Image (spheres, grey):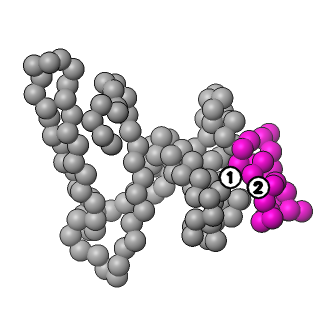
Amino acid sequence: MDGGEVGYGHQVTALYELDLRDHPKGDLVRVAVRAEPPGKEAAAIEFTATHAASDPIGPWEQASPAMRWASATATFAEVLRGAPVESETSWRDVLRLVDGALDRDREDQVEMRELVVRAAALSDQLDGPGGRVTTIR
């Protein structure tokens, strides 16, 4: 992210795909963030976080709703553009990710689920019973 793109009180979710080699060692990820609090005289603050190869990763179900939604959205985009992940990911997989993070009170999320259903219906790779993907119940 470039400075000034994220305002005070906002949050950012960044997704990176890691292509791990056999038995990785050391840090898998190092993230550094520099932030300037509001006000002209405020000094910048820097945060650094790492995730070592030896650190446990919790179950997907324990990831935050924002992380699960961002992942579902990114997977949908990758399948739409025909990325290599597309050959390994079915529309049913995308719908499962979306449904696992869906907040039915959020109109934008409900609309995106419908877009996944429409994209699946338009594709030649339907994988549900009778070649259909379920609609919102």
Q: How many residues crowd mark 2 within 10 Å: few (<14), some (14–19), many (20+)?
A: many
* Residue linked to disc 1: 95
Q: Which residues are magenta?
A: 114-137
Q: Is residue 23 above or below residue 135?
A: below
User: Residue placed at 31% from the left, 80% from the top?
Assistant: 23
- The amino acid pointed to by label 2 is Ala
Residue 17: x, y in percent? Answer: 42, 62
Residue 14 relative to residue 37: left or right: right
Q: Is residue 94 visible?
A: yes
* Residue linked to disc 2: 120
Residue 44: x, y in percent? Answer: 13, 32
Quarter-of-image position of residue 30: bottom left
Magenta span has 15? Answer: no
Residue 37: x, y in percent? Answer: 20, 25
Q: Could you say whether the residue bearing mark 2 is in a helix, strand or loop?
A: helix
Residue nearest the viewer, comparing 70 with 136? 70
Q: Is residue 97 visible?
A: no
User: Residue placed at 58% from the left, 44% from the top?
Assistant: 101
Query: Which of the two discs, 1 and 2, sits closer to the camera?
Result: 2
Residue 3 relative to residue 102: left or right: left
Residue 78 relative to residue 2: left or right: right
Kindly check if marks 1 and 2 are in contact, taking CB atoms under 8 A apart as contact.
yes
User: Residue placed at 21% from the left, 34% from the top?
Assistant: 35
Question: How many numbered tags mark residues here?
Answer: 2
- The amino acid pointed to by label 1 is Leu
Residue 79: x, y in percent? Answer: 63, 60
User: Residue placed at 63% from the left, 47% from the top?
Assistant: 98
Q: Is residue 43 above or below residue 22?
A: above
Report the Cα–Cα distance between label 1 and label 2. 9 Å
